[in-house]
Image (cartoon, rainbow, N blue to C red):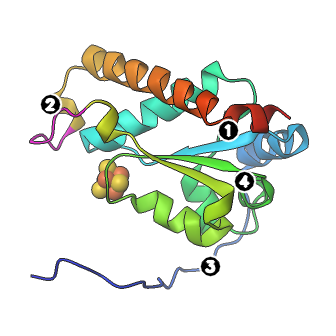
Amino acid sequence: METHTPDFSLQVQGVKGFCPAGEVYAKQQFENKTIPVLSCEGPCIRGEIARLVANFIAQDVPSLARACHAETFFVPHSSMARWVKDARQSIMIDGCFLKCHGRVLRGLVGEDRMVQIDALPFYKKYTDIFLMDDVPEDERKAVARQVADKIISELKEDRVLMAAAA
Ligand code: SF4
């Protein structure tokens, strides 16, 4: 079995139309110049923790706002994609070292305009569990809250949030 895949591209079917609510939201974020926060997500526990962490970070820091990674990647004519592509910086919370969504975002905006964070080293648990449902909801939230606090603190130390607020 291969343990490595070289860089690759994916053929994606084109699409017409917009998500009306997403358009209103993303246009507002674009005007406000907020910093997009993207994440991977469940059903894997690591993806779910990443998603919760991204939500907490965006809720706590006024200069940040959640972006929809799927609309950003797969609806290129959307305001969501325009907001992320034009942002001075984006924050990607990935669930594990594979950094699936972060690798896509890197190709879209470039390495120097994103902060890519693997959430797992911040809590180091559940490595033998796949499904998020195998960890009680309260526990998932409590772990994500702790990880979010640590990441916010690191972002402040690295002056990412100060730059975002400028
Ligand atoms: S980085 Fe990839 S493999 Fe890891 S949790 Fe996210 S989507 Fe799943």
**In the rendered structure, does residue 10 fall within the stretch colored magenta?**
no
In three-dimensional space, the C-alpha distance between marks 4 and 2, rounded to whole angstroms, equals 33 Å
Nearer-N-terminus badge (1/2): 2
Residue that appears at 56% across and 53% down: 69
Image: 124 above or below 38: above
Q: Which residue is mark 1?
A: 160
Q: Amino acid at mark 1?
A: Val
Nearer-N-terminus badge (3/1): 3
Q: Amino acid at mark 3?
A: Gly
Residue 122, disc = none
Nearer-N-terminus badge (3/2): 3
Do callouts 3 and 1 mark residues in contact (Cβ within 8 Å)? no
Secondary structure state at the residue bearing disc 3: loop
Q: Is residue 111 left or right of residue 94?
A: right
Q: Which residue is mark 4?
A: 80
Residue 14, disc = 3
Percent x, y for residue 96? 31, 49
Q: Which residue is mark 2?
A: 134
Do callouts 1 and 2 mark residues in contact (Cβ within 8 Å)? no
